[in-house]
Amino acid sequence: MLQQVNGHSSGSVAQNLPFLREGLQEFLGGDTPLHQLDDLTKVNPVTLETVLRCLQARYMADKFYTNAGCTLVALNPFKPVPPLYTPELMREYHAASQPQKLKPHIFTVGEQSYRNVKSLIEPVNQSIVVSGESGAGKTWTSRCLMKFYAVVAASPASWESHKIAERIEQRILNSNPVMEAFGNACTLRNNNSSRFGKFIQLQMNSAQQMTGAAVQTYLLEKTRVACQAINERNFHIFYQICKGASEDERLQWHLPEGAVFSWLPNPEKTLEEDCFEVTREAMLHLGIDTPTQNNIFKVLAGLLHLGNIWFADSEDETQPCQLMEDAKCSLRTSTLLLQLQEDLLLETLRIRTIKAGKQQQVFRKPCSQAECDTRRDCLAKLVYARLFDWLVSVINSSICADPDTWTAFIGLLDVYGFESFPDNSLEQLCINYANEKLQQHFVAHYMRAQQEEYAIEGLEWSFVNYQDNQICLDLIEGSPISICSLINEECRLNRPSSAAQLQTRIESALAGSPCLGHNKLSREPSFIVMHFAGPVRYHTAGLVEKNKDPVPPELTGLLQQSHDPLLRVLFPTNSKEKTQEEPSGQGRAPALTVVSKFKASLEQLLQVLHSTTPHYIRCIKPNSQGQAQTFLREEVLSQLEACGLVETIHISAAGFPIRISHQNFVERYGLLRRLHPHASSGLYSHSVPKRTSEWPPPAEEATLQPLLQDILHTLPALMQTVTTHNDPAEATTVPVHCGRTKVFMTDSVLELLECGRAQVLDQSARCIQYGWRRHQHRKQELQRQAATLLQAAIRSWLTRRHIQRLHTAATVIKHAWQKWRTRMAFLASKELDGIEEKQMPGFMSCSPQPPAQTRLLGAITRLWPLGLVLANSGTGMRGFQRKLVVCACLQLPSSSPSNYNIQTAQQDQAGVTSIRALPQGSVKFHCRKSPLQYADTCPEPSPCTVSGFNQILLERHKLIHG
């Protein structure tokens, strides 16, 4: 995020940015997690930090492909992922109605290019540029794309044509193992590093069926045949023939077990690419028969033995160098395998032939030890380079279709990535020069896509400024003076050139270029070129010699005298071949240097790319150790810079990296109208483009336009609040543009919007807090009142329930007591009635009873509970209380209870069970056993009361009043 707005530091923005970052990132990226963002353009804003975080999140989630606009970023998983490359998945992408809506994949790029060919929209031809550093997966990506086209572009109708197409597809696929065996090697960064660039042209007929292919190679690293870096290996084919040859083949090629070759370092290291049978089978499918294969492997074995030839300096400079003793056997074996004459080979390596004068007189000069080693290495590189070119031509003749049978093609370009090593020479200069050209092509295509998007949105393109790499290209290839031209001039002069002299010429002639630098602390002559991916320091030592790539004519003549059939094909005897090999210093024709040939082939390649619709795949290596699930951000960042994605991000940042749709913009920033509801539009009038009548807005857009204008009109006033008040005139323009469907803005404007939004949210949050607290207070008061009311109701209910339970219990007791009392009275009356009938049978039956007798019986019936009461309360009631009970039971006048005197007989047990006679006088209670059957019955007998009662004796006495 930018920390300045129109030159003024936005302090409040910087303070609020950490607080807003999380919410802002959630809005810009949506609610989608980073690992689910399948396009880096959806990472909002597009910065290096967000891009790295997104790639890391997707890589850790085993999602190795991510779109980046018109580019596909492919991360090397460093582990087998078979489900990603099955034929079923290829057909799924091919059959999808919209493959771009599927997960990002190289099959999406392949299918899109294939559908472009089928659409016949110009340009019909397609090209896929696969770039990346060594070990990033370029070879695997190209191989998978070829398999994809072999699957989806083969659907002939007839069985015969199907067999033909199948054979062509098999040959195209078999070209990969052969080219990888002869052109790939194990390096410090990659076990299967391509040491050459290639452009594979997949040819298709009018029915969009693949009918053939053509391969074009660029800049083979032939120096690897004779010189390998520490811990690196030679080309795979040398290890394949040493490990995979049979016993008979070992005898035929003179490759015994345990043989040591100086040009075969690290033979103990076993790789998957060391499979000899796969290479031989692929060569057989390409039309290279077994005798020819044996001839090729025999020549390669001869080169291995050639590397074991060593020389020692002679004491006499006029005499050639001496062959070391242990090298004589290697010399004989090498000449035998290459079918050369031993003396002629030794003479060619040790003696140099010089032609001088108008008569072209020939002089013979012995070579030094270093020169002998150089000529030996040159011989090996010459043979291997010719053999590689011949293999490419054989492959093309086997897989290339007749020009009349194909109408369009899809090109796969697999080139070196940007290289920067501690010691950089001509090879790195050519590779980085090619990457500069491809980066310019990519930027032009990307900017064209950006321009189309801006045009669709109705925005002007002129305001987008970015740094083009044309200055660097002018430094390397410009006219009339450039680095390449100066190096070529040194080659044409045909004079001894020192490294310091070349450095001085370059610095003096190109001193005005801003892309040229010099390291003054370096002791070795060198110069620095500021490439788009970073500065690279090139050593001038050996640049001229490598650019000349001198091939002594006597070496070519020696190989032309070979009796080997393959070498005779590689080095035919004709005058044209000799003329090309002779040095051009004696003639006036321009020298054909390495830089010239590479520049010509690169221009031809770019012409092909410009005539096609390009697609880009950037292969990234997550770590240099080749470990799965390991993402090193520093290494990934350097590769993003090398492949141009960082420059693309910078270009995007130079324009408007923040792009928000109208709907989302209004939804998020519509609340800004609360800050300045009556903001003036004068400060913003130059930043909001007017719509033209050619693009009438839709109904939804028409409703959003007033809201958009109101929001955007608040920006000038909002900017004045965050800028200094000393110079408010600088806050007159706002870098934001409103397109037809999106709002385009910079990071600074986004910060302003977010700060304004934060202010509104802060105010709203305070209001919400006040309202919430008031609501909470009211709610708590209502809850308190409700709790009090509930407590009172519950307590009332509990009390009522307790009283009801007591009332119910009392009613039950009352009913039980009444029932028992009635029953006891009935039983007692029945017993007494039976006794009286026995004593007075005539009295009860003959005449009615007198009133006194009737009252006596009523009293007996009514007053028998008095005995129970007195018995149970004899110990509890005393005095006046007992008198009240007796009076109530005897129905005495209630004038005064004290007028009556009651006497009871106290025995060992207190209590009276019953009274069955009217008291006449004094009443004495004698506790004897009652003859009544139910006299001892009690509803609830108590252990402290008398359970048995004596016979009641009634003595008549006069009542004592008093």
Image (tube, rainbow, N blue to C red):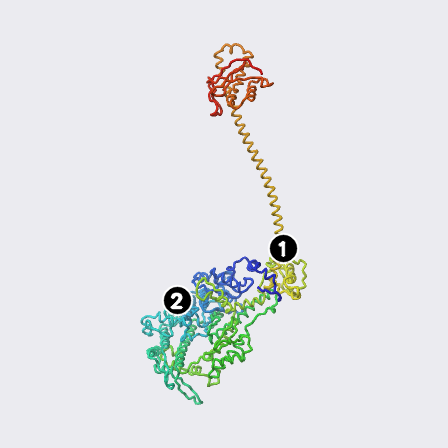
Residue 225: % across, % down:
40, 75
Q: Between 547 and 96, which is closer to the camera in this rendering?
A: 547
Q: Between 559 and 823, which is closer to the camera in this rendering?
A: 823
What kind of element bears circle 2?
helix
What kind of element bears circle 1?
helix
Seen at 51% across and 66% down, the residue is 71
Q: Please, is residue 41 above or below residue 611 in the view? A: above
Residue 257: % across, % down:
32, 71
Which of the marked residues, 1 or 2, is nearer the chain's N terminus? Answer: 2
Residue picked out by circle 2 = 272
Sort mark 1 into few (<14), some (14-19) or many (20+) by Cα contacts within 10 Å. Answer: few
Determine whether, in the image, residue 304 is placed left or right of residue 866: left
Sort mark 2 into few (<14), some (14-19) or many (20+) by Cα contacts within 10 Å. Answer: few
Q: Please, is residue 795 above or below residue 12 in the view? A: above
> Where residue 763 is drawn, which disc sits there?
1
The amino acid type, in three-letter code, at marker 1 is Gln
Q: Between 866 and 99, which is closer to the camera in this rendering?
A: 866
The amino acid type, in three-letter code, at marker 2 is Glu
Q: Please, is residue 255 above or below residue 770 in the view? A: below
Q: Identify the image quadrant of the N terminus.
A: bottom right
Residue 541: % across, % down:
46, 78
Q: Quadrant of residue 460?
A: bottom right
Residue 742 visible in this rendered orientation of the protein:
no
Report how many numbered discs are placed on residues in the image.
2
Q: Identify the image quadrant of the C terminus.
A: top right
Residue 914: % across, % down:
50, 19
Q: Quadrant of residue 28?
A: bottom right
Viewer-nearest of discs 1 and 2: 1
Seen at 58% across and 59% down, the residue is 20
> Where residue 294 is drawn, which disc sits there?
none
